[in-house]
Image: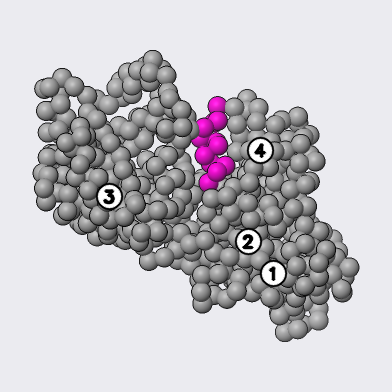
């Protein structure tokens, strides 16, 4: 649901502070523990929660994906990851949830079925790292049409020529991978990141969702 | 391109040796990612790479095979993309790699076709090659794809049989999915998680297959069939005894299929098979399987 994320960012802007977006892997180390982790995140300061969908592949850039083994060993499936979100949503109507992972489990689950179930479980956005903008018809556009944000990664190698393409159909927020390499393996230079953020802001005037609505209207 | 460092992934070590050779020729540092299981079972190729000056990095994640080596190479690449070129060896992976690999590997098919016309004055009746990720196969198939009279067969690793999980027959026994940036036939469970697979040969031990092979299977241009570990092992010995050529375990799968098909074909019909690697690298593995200590 895009309204929940819009409201969260509007409230944060009114408070004059940035959002703290936190990530955890669904099902790691087991269903109950990860549900408890998720429930504890908002009171610990998390404004937006990224819920990881385990997949045993370690590319391109996201370190938490090096830890899906324990989640998968615990029998975690995409349906169970959705169930974690649903159970969380019963007690929290305000914190946006973004599901993050790789495309194949969604593809096998079925895109339409996944989007319907995600909406029903209170999901507000998706980050699917191995779907570039050339593949927007697969999941991005169907998600936007169902009012789920599609959030894309930009990296230091996403230059000014590529950025408009990467951002074309995104909404919610932009995930900037602030360094080349695996996130968390070294600390990026804040000055460099600041410059990059300004560069990206020059490209984010119109979100894909607004553009899509304009086309429909 | 201004890149000063080369990385590669390898299964059987053939592509690793090739990458190490070209890096040595141009004086570039070369890092080859190789599954720890494969490092052990393909020791002679590991030694060759080291002799050529490459650094071989064993990958212990997953089953320690080609898929895991590819993951690690991709991680290295995204970290060092400013100075590093990733020389992918298999016909799988993100666009445009499958297309590039098909172009480069086609040299073998173009030359084979030319030599066939010179030696026999006509096209072969059957072209056959082993398929893991599918680089050697796409190379020899490609110049013959538009020759309708030529039957083409790709041989997948049937491992210990298609009933369980211990095989790498992505087309024969897998289903479509998305992995490593391409949509292709994969070994996966009902939740879309990738299975490890198994093959006696390191070069065929990959839970996917190049997307062009999937397409060729879907349009019916190429037939893909499985050969079991034990059949490949038998073919390995047969070729060694009959021709004095020790084949690698990968093309031993293709040899086994030739042995099955040849008796049913006419005496004048021609089979072109890609003997894509030599078996020196496999003698320790085969020796162990045959109960002969080396």
Instruction: State the CA–CA distance, disc 2 to disc 1.
Output: 10 Å
Q: Where is residue A1 in the image (x, y as percent from the top left)?
A: 16, 44
Instruction: State the CA–CA distance, disc 3 to disc 4.
Output: 38 Å
**Which mark lies nearer to you, 3 or 1?**
3
Classify mark 2: helix, strand or loop: helix
State whether discs 3 and 4 lie on one chain.
Answer: no
- Looking at marks 2 and 1 on the same chain, the residue that comes earlier in the sequence is marked by 2
Q: Would you name the residue on which mark 2 appears?
A: B204
Discs 3, 4 touching: Cβ within 8 Å: no
| Side of A134 where A36 appears, left or right | left
- Looking at marks 4 and 1 on the same chain, the residue that comes earlier in the sequence is marked by 4
Image quarter (top left, top right, bottom left or bottom right) of the C terminus of chain A: top left
Q: Where is residue A68 in the image (x, y as percent from the top left)?
A: 40, 50
- Looking at marks 4 and 2 on the same chain, the residue that comes earlier in the sequence is marked by 4
Discs 2, 1 touching: Cβ within 8 Å: yes
Q: Would you name the residue on which mark 3 appears?
A: A34
Discs 3, 1 touching: Cβ within 8 Å: no
Q: Position of residue A113 (x, y in %)?
A: 24, 60
Q: Which residue is drawn at 30% across and 50% down?
A: A26
Q: Residue at x 84, y 61 (%)?
A: B118
Instruction: State the CA–CA distance, disc 4 to disc 2.
Output: 21 Å
Residue farthest bottom in this picture: B264
């Amino acid at each position: 649901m895009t309204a929940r994320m819009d409201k969260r960012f509007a409230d944060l802007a009114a408070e004059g502070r940035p959002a703290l977006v936190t990530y955890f892997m669904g099902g790691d180390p087991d269903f109950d523990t990860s549900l408890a982790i998720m429930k504890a995140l908002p009171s610990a300061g998390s404004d937006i929660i990224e819920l990881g969908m385990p997949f045993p592949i370690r590319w391109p850039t996201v370190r938490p994906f090096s830890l899906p083994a324990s989640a998968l060993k615990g029998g975690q499936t995409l349906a169970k990851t959705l169930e974690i979100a649903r159970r969380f949503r019963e007690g929290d109507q305000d914190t946006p949830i973004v599901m993050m992972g790789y495309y194949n489990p969604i593809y096998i689950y079925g895109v339409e079925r996944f989007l319907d179930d995600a909406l029903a479980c209170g999901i507000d956005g998706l980050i699917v790292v191995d779907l570039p903008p050339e593949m927007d018809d697969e999941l991005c556009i169907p998600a936007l049409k169902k009012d789920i944000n599609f959030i894309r990664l930009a990296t230091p190698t996403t230059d000014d020529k590529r950025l408009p393409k990467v951002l074309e159909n995104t909404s919610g927020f932009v995930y900037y991978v602030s360094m080349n390499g695996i996130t968390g393996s070294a600390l990026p230079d804040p000055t460099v990141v600041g410059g990059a953020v300004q560069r990206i802001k020059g490209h984010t005037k119109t979100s894909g969702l607004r553009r899509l609505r304009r086309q429909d209207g | 391109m201004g890149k000063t460092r080369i990385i590669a992934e390898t299964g059987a070590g053939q592509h690793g040796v090739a990458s190490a050779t070209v890096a040595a020729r141009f004086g570039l540092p070369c890092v080859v990612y190789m599954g720890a299981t494969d490092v052990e079972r393909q020791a002679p190729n590991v030694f060759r790479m080291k002799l050529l000056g490459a650094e071989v990095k064993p990958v212990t994640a997953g089953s320690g095979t080609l898929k895991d080596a590819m993951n690690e190479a991709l991680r290295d690449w995204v970290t060092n993309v400013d100075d590093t070129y990733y020389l992918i060896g298999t016909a799988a992976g993100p666009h445009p790699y499958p297309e590039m690999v098909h172009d480069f590997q086609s040299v073998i098919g173009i030359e084979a076709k030319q030599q066939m016309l010179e030696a026999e004055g006509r096209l072969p009746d059957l072209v056959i090659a082993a398929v893991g990720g599918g680089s050697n196969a796409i190379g020899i198939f490609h110049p013959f794809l538009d020759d309708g009279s030529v039957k083409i067969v790709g041989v997948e690793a049937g491992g210990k049989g298609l009933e369980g999980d211990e095989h790498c027959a992505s087309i024969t026994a897998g289903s479509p999915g998305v992995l490593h940036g391409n949509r292709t036939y994969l070994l996966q469970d009902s939740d879309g998680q990738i299975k490890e697979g198994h093959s006696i040969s390191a070069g065929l031990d990959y839970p996917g297959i190049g997307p062009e092979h999937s397409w060729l299977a879907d349009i019916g241009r190429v037939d893909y069939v499985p050969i079991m570990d034990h059949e490949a092992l038998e073919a390995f010995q047969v070729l060694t005894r009959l021709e004095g050529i020790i084949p690698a375990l990968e093309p031993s799968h293709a040899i086994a299929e030739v042995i099955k098909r040849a008796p049913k074909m006419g005496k004048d019909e021609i089979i072109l098979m890609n003997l894509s690697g030599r078996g020196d690298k496999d003698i320790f593995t085969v020796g162990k399987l045959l109960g002969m200590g080396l």
